[in-house]
Amino acid sequence: MPFCPNDRYEYLPGITHCPDCGAELVDELPDMPAPDVRWVKMKDLPGMVYAQMVAEVLEQRGVPHYIQSLFGSGGLGVVTGANFAGSSARIWVPEDYLDQAQEIQDEMMQDI
Ligand SMILES: [Zn+2]
């Protein structure tokens, strides 16, 4: 699965360059920038579009984050029920930011 080494987003297979910053995507991310940070996941989102909307607000609030897209295979997580492959995403944030980030996400998802 290709990742952008700069903003650590994960992209669909076949994409070679980051649409955001133009960097060449890599197969695996190097170690997280701050190895002592414990990353935790927030509630799953119904799609990348939502994840990117939430990520934009997190960015504005200065919350570190990265998006994981759930494609159903590749060991990234079990996708069940209505969430067929490719339909969902989740955001990881450092543990210290989880409450704040989850609150932001919940607020945003209420309006949808
Ligand atoms: Zn990028």
Image (cartoon, rainbow, N blue to C red):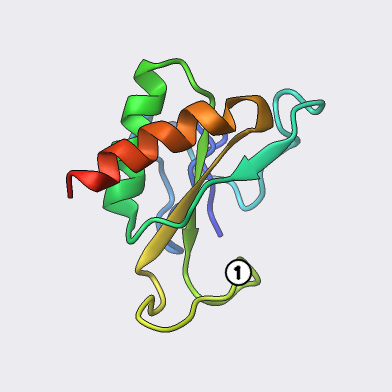
Q: Give the residue type that dot 1 points to.
A: Gly
Q: Residue furthest left?
A: 112
SS for callout 1: loop
Residue 76 is left or right of residue 11, and the answer is: right
The 10 Å Cα crowd at callout 1, few under 14, some 14 to 19, many 20 or more, is few
**Could you say where residue 99 lies in the image, as x and y percent from the top left?**
54, 31
Q: Quadrant of residue 48?
A: bottom left
Asked whether 98 or 67 is in front, the reply is 98
Q: Is residue 6 visible?
A: no
Q: Residue at x 18, y 44 (%)?
A: 111
Residue 95 is left or right of residue 53, and the answer is: right
Q: Residue at x 29, y 48 (%)?
A: 50
Q: Residue furthest right?
A: 36
**Could you say where residue 105 lies in the image, as x and y percent from the top left?**
37, 39
Residue 48 is left or right of residue 67, and the answer is: left
Image quadrant, ligand 1: top left
Q: Residue at x 40, y 40 (%)?
A: 18
Q: Is residue 65 visible?
A: yes
**Could you say where residue 96 lies in the image, as x and y percent from the top left?**
65, 25
Which residue is identified by label 1?
77
Which quarter of the rendered picture does the N terminus lie within? bottom right
Compared to residue 80, the image places residue 105 above or below, namely above
